[in-house]
């Protein structure tokens, strides 16, 4: 029974976005990038949990059960210590997002500026159905083509230029709902 | 990856407003400015560090205390005093953490410091590390600032190349390493003990104070100083101007400058650096931000980030003068400082001013705020975890027209049961907006309710929710 619960909590079912991300694999580059980060925390390896998870998510799109085991082994931790971090932080995902992951600010100033309408427009244009997910990203909502995924983020700290969103690592401000099409267009390929 | 600059059409290349006093934001949007160390050095960069390392560390702390500098992250605690809380007989390593987890809704000042003037922050940070004796320091940058993290890491590299960092910096015999640590999207990491837990690689459950005051028992149970980005930048200017010189800026007990971030329903939102207390609410919202949008009027203002208590535009306050007499102060005449805002029943907080005009239903505003706190509660303390979720459920129904007038009482009583019953200040942060909005807009909230909502057979959720909250 407990094994079944654990499996369920670490499962990463395929999404349409999966094809854009390589399967988790350990490589010398991955090891050395991780070792460099670990060196930032002399005598306190566990502190590198978040940095290592960021490396994994950046390279592989999300954090799989194998990745959790690898991070745990790297830091001499029980895997549960890593899983509890993955499942807590909204910034970590356990399934593949789209090739371009869009995070729209949900919070007050952006909402006043029309960020919820922006979200609706993005979903309409990409064919994403958010009706069965919670307010944020459980699970990540991916478009059928796998190119785009969306989630609401809490305050992106640019309230003066509302509404704002992040597309992967690119920040966009003043994205009124009517600019949704143009935004997507710039990420077509 | 293609990047269309049209999408980032809003840029603030506007010159500073005449009412502004730019100290920290001197280089933000400055013509010909860039975040490289070369440009920073041309402008006298790192001169204050050279000056500071010739001083006794204790003397630096003394200057910062004299300056009256108060933390710019939210609580407004005196920075120099915080530094003196490191136990005098300490033998453990001391750490310094720069809190760049800017995530209080309405606040967007640190973003521009990190993007446009990272060396100013580093210089202030290195001086502070020297003052408190920290040899390792971390900059905790929120995950949603990926570009800022890259810029700051590059700035650290540059500073190291110039021997402002690393072993034996500037031939002083002092060693210092600064690293960037990225968060992962959790608001609670802005709370200093939650941040420390996160930096230790754990869930960011805040620690209880006492005993876990970071200055005594912080990172790895060692003395740790946690300061906001803006506060650390100010340290550089304290060294430049001297503690007494700096204290001449602003008002007594509210010294220096601070950055106010205005968003919401004004014509020209943006950031403004002012001398603390020298600009009133009217000057800020009308002269600097252009007033409300055409045909609308300002209804209320949240003055210090979404956790601060809302102020109505038609209010006035009875304040006590130092000589004991009373005076009345209207909303529009409130000076933007720490103490007056506190006396008016709110707080200066993080400087995030959110303006709400008369086109907004206050129930919608409250629901949006409640959704934020329900999502961001870390879940450690039951009153906050359960309470913030219940408050959202009730206001969800309120905006859908499915709440009864009694729900407003229930909402208020849930808020009162969170306030003061949690390990960290998130309990207050989540319940104050509810308490303040109910206290000041009760009639408007009740107008959005429906006496018969609970009896509607199509509304089983209200009945179900009330079953759990029927104790009143």
Image (cartoon, coloured by chain):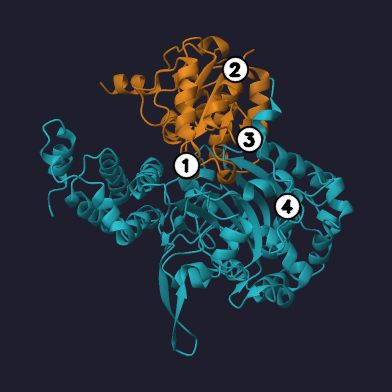
Q: Is residue B292 above or below residue B376?
A: below
Q: Residues within 10 Å of mark 3 (few under 14, many from 20)?
A: some
Q: Nearer the viewer, mark 2 or mark 1?
A: 1
Residue B8 found in image quarter: top right
**What residue is pinned by disc 4?**
B122
Q: Nearer the viewer, mark 4 or mark 1?
A: 1
Task: State whether discs 2 and 1 lie on one chain.
Answer: yes
Residue B31 rendering spot, x and y as whole percentages: 82, 47
> Which colour represents chain B?
cyan
Q: Which mark is residue B146?
A: 3
Chain colored orange? A
Q: Position of residue A1 (x, y in %)?
A: 25, 21
Q: Are marks 3 and 2 in contact (CB under 8 Å)?
A: no
Rendered-image quadrant of the C terminus of chain B: bottom left
Alpha carbon distance from label 3 to label 1? 25 Å
Comparing labels 3 and 1, the label whose residue is closer to the camera: 1
Of callouts 2 and 1, the N-terminal one: 2
Residues tagged by mark 3 and mark 2 found on one chain of the structure: no
Residue A26 bears which disc, if any?
2
**Mark in the foreground, 4 or 2:** 4
| Label 1 CA crowd tier, 10 Å (few <14, some 14–19, many 20+) | many
User: Is residue B224 among what the camera can see?
Assistant: no
B394 and B78: which is toward the camera: B394
Q: Is residue B263 visible?
A: yes
- Please report, as a chain letter, where disc 4 is located: B
Q: Cα distance, mark 2 to mark 1?
A: 45 Å
| Dot 2 alpha-carbon crowd within 10 angstroms: few under 14, some 14 to 19, many 20 or more | few
Q: Is residue B109 above or below residue A172?
A: below
Instruction: Name the foreground residue: B399 vs B337.
Output: B399
Most foreground residue, B51 or B463: B463
**Label 2 secondary element:** loop
């Amino acid at each position: 029974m407990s094994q079944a619960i654990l499996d369920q909590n670490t499962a990463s079912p395929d999404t349409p976005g999966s094809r854009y991300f390589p399967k988790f694999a350990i490589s010398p580059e991955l090891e050395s990038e991780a070792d460099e980060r670990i060196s930032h925390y002399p005598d306190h390896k566990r502190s590198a949990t978040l940095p290592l998870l960021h490396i994994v998510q950046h390279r592989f799109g999300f954090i799989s059960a194998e990745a959790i085991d690898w991070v745990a082994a790297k830091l001499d931790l029980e895997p549960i210590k890593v899983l509890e971090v993955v499942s807590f932080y909204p910034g970590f995902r356990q399934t593949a997002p789209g090739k371009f992951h869009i995070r729209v600010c949900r919070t007050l100033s952006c909402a006043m500026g029309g960020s919820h309408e922006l979200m609706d427009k993005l979903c309409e244009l990409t064919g994403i159905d958010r009706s069965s997910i919670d307010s944020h990203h459980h699970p990540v909502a991916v478009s059928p083509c796998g190119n785009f995924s969306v989630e609401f983020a809490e305050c992106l700290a640019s309230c003066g230029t509302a509404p704002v969103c992040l597309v992967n690592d690119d920040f966009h401000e003043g994205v009124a709902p009517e600019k949704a099409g143009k935004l997507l267009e710039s990420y077509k390929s | 990856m293609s990047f269309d600059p049209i999408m980032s059409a809003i840029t603030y290349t506007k010159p500073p407003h005449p009412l502004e006093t730019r100290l920290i934001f001197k280089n933000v949007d400055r013509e010909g400015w860039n975040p490289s160390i070369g440009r920073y050095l041309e402008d006298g960069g790192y001169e204050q560090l050279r000056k500071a390392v010739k001083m006794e560390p204790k003397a630096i702390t003394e200057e910062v205390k004299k300056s009256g500098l108060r933390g710019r992250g939210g609580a407004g605690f005196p920075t120099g005093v915080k530094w003196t809380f490191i136990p005098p007989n300490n033998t453990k390593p001391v750490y310094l953490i720069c809190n760049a987890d800017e995530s209080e809704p309405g606040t967007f000042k640190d973003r521009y410091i990190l993007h446009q003037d990272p060396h100013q922050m580093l210089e202030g940070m290195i001086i502070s590390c020297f003052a408190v004796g920290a040899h390792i320091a971390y900059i905790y940058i929120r995950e949603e600032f990926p570009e800022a993290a890259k810029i700051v890491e590059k700035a650290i590299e540059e500073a190291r190349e110039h021997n402002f960092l690393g072993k034996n910096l500037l031939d002083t015999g002092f060693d210092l390493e600064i690293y960037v640590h990225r968060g992962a999207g959790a608001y609670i990491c802005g709370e200093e003990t939650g941040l420390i837990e996160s930096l230790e690689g754990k869930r960011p459950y805040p620690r209880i104070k006492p005993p876990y005051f970071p200055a005594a028992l912080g990172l790895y149970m060692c003395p740790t100083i946690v300061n906001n980005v803006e506060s650390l930048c100010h340290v550089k200017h304290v060294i430049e101007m001297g503690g007494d010189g700096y204290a001449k800026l602003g008002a007594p007990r509210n010294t220096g400058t601070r950055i106010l971030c205005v968003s919401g329903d004004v014509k020209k939102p943006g950031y403004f650096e002012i001398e603390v207390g020298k600009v009133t609410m009217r000057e800020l919202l009308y002269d600097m931000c252009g007033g409300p949008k055409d045909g609308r009027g300002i209804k209320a203002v949240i003055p210090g980030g979404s956790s601060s208590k809302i102020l109505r535009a038609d209010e006035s306050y009875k304040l006590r003068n130092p000589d004991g007499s009373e005076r009345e102060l209207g909303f529009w005449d409130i000076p933007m400082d720490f103490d007056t805002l506190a006396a008016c029943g709110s707080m200066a907080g993080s400087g995030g001013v959110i303006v709400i005009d008369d086109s907004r239903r206050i129930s919608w505003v409250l629901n949006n705020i409640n959704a934020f706190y329900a999502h961001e509660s870390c879940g450690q303390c039951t009153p906050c975890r359960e309470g913030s979720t219940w408050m959202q459920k009730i206001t969800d129904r309120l905006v859908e027209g499915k709440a009864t007038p009694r729900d407003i009482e229930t909402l208020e009583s849930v808020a009162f049961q969170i306030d003061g019953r949690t390990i960290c200040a998130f309990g207050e942060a989540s319940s104050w907006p509810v308490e303040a909005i109910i206290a000041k807009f009760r009639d408007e909230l009740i107008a959005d309710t429906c006496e018969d909502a609970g009896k509607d057979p199509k509304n089983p959720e209200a009945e179900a929710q009330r079953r759990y909250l029927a104790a009143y």
